[in-house]
Every structure is written in structure tokens, then in C-alpha cells.
Amino acid sequence: MNLLIIDCHDLGQHLGSYGWKTMPTPNLDTLAAKGLRFENHFCTAPQCSPSRSGIYTGRYPHANGMFGLAHDPFNWRLNPDEKHLARILRDAGFQTTLIGIQHVTGFDTRLIEELGYQNNWSVIKARDVGEMTSKFFEESVQEPFFLKIGFFYPHRDDHGRYFQEPPDRSLGVAIPPYLPQSDQAAEEMAEFQGLVGEMDKSVGRILSKLEETGMLADTLVIFTTDHGIAMPRAKCTLYDPGIATALIMYSQALNLVGGKVVHDLISNVDLVPTILDLMVIDPPPNLQGQSFAGLLREQAYQAREEIFAEKTFHTTYEPQRAIRTKRYKLIWNVEAGIINVPGDIMHSPIFPQMIDEITEERPYFELYDLLNDPLEHHNLIDDPAYAEIFDDLRQRLLAWMEETQDPILQGPIKSPFYDHGKAQLDEGS
């Protein structure tokens, strides 16, 4: 059994198969129609590196050490004893290959090899990812393989805009309901759709090549993303637009077919234990996610009653923890105050239109009834009718943090900048 994981940046659930009918994603929509689509899949963190660390270690970011971004100048790293999925599968005899981006460590070849990848091709443009992958299948592949394809798209560029590809309005433009219904928002979403469309074309090319080689029948195909789109109230927030993410799975050999929609709560920290379960590979003993392979096999399994999400650092320190059930969400703002907005979102022309809403002071707790308030605008923390719900969620959140040994319970968490700054003081430079 081979494994192909395709992930991308900053997508959320913005695919046609998830109801965004203006998204030009025919190839991913076809994959969903042939396989399984997960309606209630959530990330462990609404930022790139922490979320990806959960996807590929099966452990929460606060447990695996990835409290913030992996790239310079932040330079967060997994704890030395963490096992990335690539390393687990390499040790099990798989050929492990990375094409595109990974964002769980630095960009040096040595660091990527330490994750467990034997081969590594770094490309950014979506069409180049598709071309390189086709070449890999033609010239370099060995079975069993683990191929991880990482698309940079639809991440904003260095100037905070979606300018890498032309806008796409071929199916119209849909603006998420939590954004202003303005001309600027429509233009940004058209640009966003252009990037997603180019990614989808490459996904189609990759899947076609896999089928041409005859390996599709024995390959587990997974598509997912790290977190929500780079818009206000989405990326870097614990609101649903920040943590709800796409997950599509397809496998002929495992009978993951039929265009089924799974409504169970799933966390991306569950992917590693599920993959290893499906591929009959012994898991590391310290996994914190739970396998949902029983669900996929239509066997007995313990369904989740909640998912957990967190943020500690992005560009600055902003610790938050959250618990979400099918109906309710509780967010603990560990250090209440003004929310930090990521730089790429601040460059958006939408940001000034929402600045008052985005930068208003946050309380310690936010409690939302997602059935009656899906946009999470009405904080119920002071409503006595929800006191028992608040107390139940608070205790469950605290129990999870204690069980997973979240260090935020022991006090503030220092960043790599502290060690660098202390070294400057000690050295007198």
C-alpha cells in the first residue's frame, strides 16, 4: 500500500465539494465524489507550522514543541524525540519523498532529511509541483512509497496579496459571510480563486499520472490543508473559519469510495494514527490523536465528542486554547487583550473595513452556540442560561490540557527570541 498526501496553505474548506460553488476545483471535487469527504474536520491550530505538526506527528503542537512558525526568524522546531510520519514510514521500508513545501522545520536539506524524507524537491508554483510530480512518477518512484506534496498556494505573496496567478471569475465570486460584502472583498476572493484553480489543475495532473502508472489502485490518497483562509476572522483565529479544514480520502484497496460524506467530528491530530492503523503499521506509543479507521471500515469505533484547538505564537505571543463540540465552542484567551492580526491579512484591502471588529479587546472567555450563532458574533459567557454549559466545557478543556501536559498551565511560554536575546546580553554584542 502506497500513501500520497497532498496538502496546501490557507484553504479552509473552500472547495466546490464543500459548497463553495464559485471555486474552480473540478479535480478535487471529483476526488471527493469518488472517495470520502469529511464535513467536520478541524485543525489543531489556525497557523501553518503548528497545524502541520499536528497533522504529521499525531500530537498536539503544545506537546510536540511547535508553538509557532518554523521559518526564519521564528525558527520553532519539533522536540528532538518527535517522530514525523515520514520518519515512521521510512523506518517501515517506504520510499519517502517531499515535493513542494513542508513548513514543519527549516528549509535546509539536512533539516528536511531529519524529518524522514529521503528525497526532496522544493518548488513553489503550482504548475511546477505538478510537473515535478509527473517526472517523479515516471523516473524515480519505488513502491511502497510515501509521497507528500505540499502546495504553497493559495498563500498570499510576500506583499500580502494573491498576485501569483490571474484572478478567476469563471463561476462567479462568493464572499464568505463573515467578511464585508464589498467590491474589495469580491476582488480579493477572485484572486484567491485564481490560486486555488491553479492548484486544482496540478492536482488533476498528479492524479492522472498516478492512474497512468497503474499505482492508483494500491495508493491511499489524502487531500487536506493546514487552516482557514488568510482573511480577518479566519486564519490565526479559533473561530470556525480559522479551524475548519478540508479533508478528502480515496482508496480503492481500502474501499474508501462512493462519494460518502462523513459528519463525525475529526481532528487533524487523528490522521497519523488512522493512516498507521489502515496500513497496519505499529504506531509510536505517545500519539495523542485517535484512529478513526474503524469508522472508515464501518466497524465499531469511539466517536469524538469534541475537538481541541490552540494558538500560542504566530508573529507574537498570543496564547489561546479552545474546545468545540458539535454545537458549542469555548475559547480561553489566556492573556486577554487586543488580538494580533497577521501581517499578510493586514495588507489586505479588507482589513481596514473590519479594523474595529478585529481589534476590539477580547475577554478571557468566549462561549458560542454554533447552532444559533454560526458566525460566532454573540459571546454568551455572561448569559446565566449557559452557565452549566460553560462550566462543563471549561472542565473538559482543563482536563485535556492536564492530560496532554500543556505547559501554558505552568506559566508563560518563552519563544526562541528570548534565547537569542539572552545570548546577546551574555555576549555583550
Image (cartoon, grey):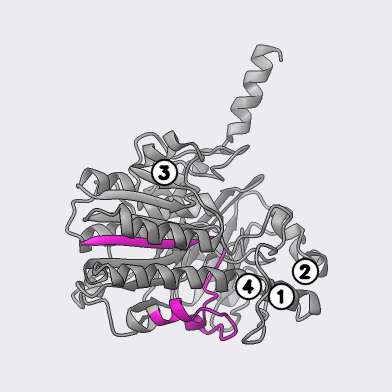
Q: CA distance from mark 1 to mark 4?
A: 19 Å
* Mark 4 or mark 3, whichever is nearer to me: 4
Q: Is tag 1's residue or tag 3's residue first in the polypeptide sequence?
A: 3
Q: Quadrant of the N terminus?
A: bottom left
Check contact, mark 1 vs mark 2: CB within 8 A. Answer: yes
Gap between marks 1 and 3 measured at Cα: 34 Å
Q: CA distance from mark 2 to mark 3?
A: 35 Å
Q: Which residue bears the numbered disc 1? A: 179
Quarter-of-image position of residue 147: bottom left
**Magenta span has 154?**
no
Q: Which residue is mark 3?
A: 64
Q: Earlier in the sequence, mark 2 or mark 3?
A: 3
286 in relation to 308, above or below: above
Q: Earlier in the sequence, mark 4 or mark 3?
A: 3
Which image quarter: residue 154? bottom right
User: What mark, if any, has residue 380 been given in the picture?
Assistant: none
Amino acid at pointer 3: Asn
Range covered by the magenta-colored residues? 1-30
Q: Considering the numbered disc 3 on the image, is that residue within a helix, a strand or a loop? A: helix
Please give the residue where the numbered disc 2 appears in the rendered image: 350
Does dot 2 land on a helix, a strand or a loop?
A: loop
Q: Are marks 1 and 3 in contact (CB under 8 Å)?
A: no
Name the residue at 38% across, 78% down: 31
Amino acid tagged 2: Ile
Measured in 3D between alpha carbons, the distance from the residue under mark 4 to the one under mark 2, in whole angstroms, is 18 Å
Residue 243 percent coordinates (x, y): 53, 65
The answer for how far apart the CA atoms under marks 4 and 3 are is 35 Å
